[in-house]
Image (cartoon, rainbow, N blue to C red):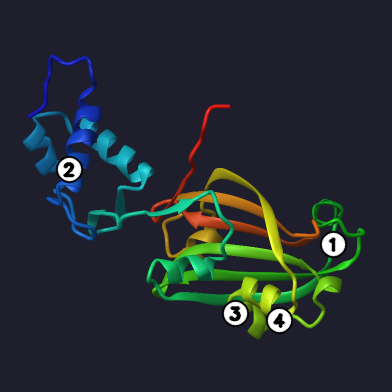
Amino acid sequence: MLNKQSPLPMYYQIEEDIRQRIARLEYLPGEAIPSERALTETYDVSRMTVRQAVNNLVQEGLLYREKGKGTFIAETKMEQPLTGLTSFTEDMKRRGLKPGNKLLSFDVKEAGSNLAAKLQIEVGERVFEVKRVRLADEVPMALETTFIPYALMPGLTQANIQQSFYAYVESELGLTIGRAEQAIEASLADEAEAEALAIPLHAALLGIERLTFTTENTPFELVQSAYRADRYKFLAEITRN
């Protein structure tokens, strides 16, 4: 099955074979892959080689482990374009999924220097701090912390934030959402993130910070999100200037 004369490492060839089996639907989401021992016999390689291939696919998000049960095929990742400005609720509805929130906290705090600079407010001004888990068909997808200038929308309530926040901003407040600045970086889940998202400790995350502005160039929210890397990937179309 493997070409031992190839310059490609054995573990890489195993990874590619498993990828192809997933693409051909020989392995379906939620199904367990064969044990390390079985794969060692199938590919006629050492267990260390098999383990390296499987570990790489787990890190990539194609596979996931359940302690004491085995290694399984992950669900297909959602593809999120980096063009267009939509809310999580709008995005999930567009995919035919039921959006949901698990509100963890809804507080008012004073802005520190870093937060104040980003929201273009004075240090010490009040901001809403909202922490919640974003759900799709009841499955945790992201852990999100949102900061909103209190003076911009003092009447904001938990009920408002539990629905589509963008719909509230545009329909209830009469503001027009214009643009956003977004940064993405990789991270590993800490204990709080792992618990909130029902994933293993140190699982891969996509850390996203988005600062959103009205059409009058006023920042109205700073969102810091940790998306599950096993369920999400971001796409961008790039043209040569």
Q: Which of marks 1 and 4 is in front?
A: 4
Q: Is residue 212 left or right of residue 197?
A: right
Residue ID at (57%, 43%): 185
The answer to the question of whether label 2 and label 3 lie on touching residues, with beta carbons closer than 8 A, is no
- Mark on residue 162? 3
Q: Nearer the viewer, mark 2 or mark 4?
A: 4
| Element type where label 1 sits in the image | loop
The answer to the question of whether label 2 and label 4 lie on touching residues, with beta carbons closer than 8 A, is no
| Element type where label 2 sits in the image | helix
Which residue was labeled with disc 2?
Answer: 36
**Which amino acid does the dot numbered 2 rest on?**
Glu
The answer to the question of whether label 3 and label 4 lie on touching residues, with beta carbons closer than 8 A, is no
Residue 59: quarter of image:
top left
* N-terminal-most mark, 2 or 4: 2
Which residue was labeled with disc 4?
Answer: 172
Q: How far apart are marks 2 and 4 (CA)?
A: 56 Å
> Would residue 202 be visible to someone looking at this image?
no
From the top left corner, tell me how far across and down residue 100 is, in percent. 49, 76
* N-terminal-most mark, 3 or 4: 3
Location of the C terminus by quadrant is top right
| Element type where label 3 sits in the image | helix
From the top left corner, tell me how far across and down residue 99 is, in percent. 47, 74
Which residue was labeled with disc 1?
Answer: 111
* N-terminal-most mark, 1 or 2: 2
From the top left corner, tell me how far across and down residue 162 is, in percent. 59, 79
Q: Nearer the viewer, mark 2 or mark 3?
A: 3
Judge by depth and name the residue closer to the eye, 215 or 156: 215
Q: How far apart are marks 2 and 3 (CA)?
A: 44 Å
Q: Nearer the viewer, mark 3 or mark 1?
A: 3
**Which amino acid does the dot numbered 3 rest on?**
Gln
Residue ID at (30%, 58%): 75
